[in-house]
Image (tube, rainbow, N blue to C red):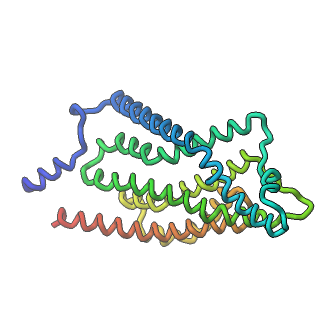
Amino acid sequence: MSETEEHKSQNDAPEEVEGHMGFFEHLEELRKRIVWAVVWLLVGCAAGWFMKDFVVDDVLFRPLLEIVSRHSESVGEELSNQQNAVLQNLSPMGVPFFYFKIVLVVGFVLAFPMILYQLWLFVGPGLYDSERSWAGKITVFTSICFLTGIAFAYFAMMPLMLNFAFSWEAPNIQTVIEINEYFSFMITIVLSAGLVFELPMIIMVLARVGLVTPEFLRKYRRHAIVLILIIAAILTPTPDPVGQLTFGIPVMLLYELSIIIAKFVRKKAQEADQPAVS
């Protein structure tokens, strides 16, 4: 091995803290990162508290009220009269718990990138330089995938599913929606989409460490489609095929994108290994 290659391998070695980090040092570092993650979560919740009225009126209830307005106009009813019939609280502590959950979810979404950053700070010192160069990008990519999934669920899935649900209204049946039930309905869809949209990032990591290949993903494409449809049926709160397909088709496209990403990652890994081989 030449001096240049030896120097490069030494620089590429994992960082060492005081020569060696023992078990209790790892626990202390983990405790530190958990504390900072909780701090960022509290900061996000504080921001969510000041935003709670905006989130409830202009974000959470807007898809529902727009659908209600559209269907009310079709039968000649006023939206103001229909709102009281649609949104109700059926528990003495329902409204306080409702706002508490709003603040908690908003805080988690706002703090999600910083929570990932704390995870990165915990595992970063044990990685090689080459691994640190792409692990930081994964943190950013993970946040983008998560927020993209949330946006897709809110702007695409929710209107379609609510419109499908209200299209089955009967003249003699009054639809009464409890606010906490509606909140659980929306959060299940939105957060599930955010997590499922992490599929390209997961495939990128697995391809980077050599656990999956493009050939493997192509070979089991049919199995993946069946699994995606099963997951869509489980995660979507409504049994209608509209919601399941609205959720499943984008995930299938993400699977195809993951195959392209796996191919790209392998190509980059082969290019990086060529100088070492020569």
Q: Residue 190 at what x, y percent from top left? A: 60, 55
In the foreground, 275 or 105: 105
Say above or below: 235 vs 240: above
Residue depicted at x 55% and y 57%:
150
Residue drawn at x 78%, y 66% as measured from the top left: 71
Q: Quadrant of residue 166?
A: bottom right
Question: Residue 96, percent across and down?
Answer: 68, 36
Q: What is the x, y in percent for residue 73?
A: 79, 67
Residue positioned 16% across, 47% down in the render? 10
* 223 relative position to 19: left or right: right
Image mark count: 0
Residue 273 visible within the image: yes
**Which quarter of the picture shows residue 18?**
top left
Image position of 257 with respect to 31: above or below:
below
Q: Is residue 98 left or right of residue 218?
A: right
Vertical side of 264 occupied by 60: above or below: above
In the image, 241 versus 110, the foreground residue is: 110
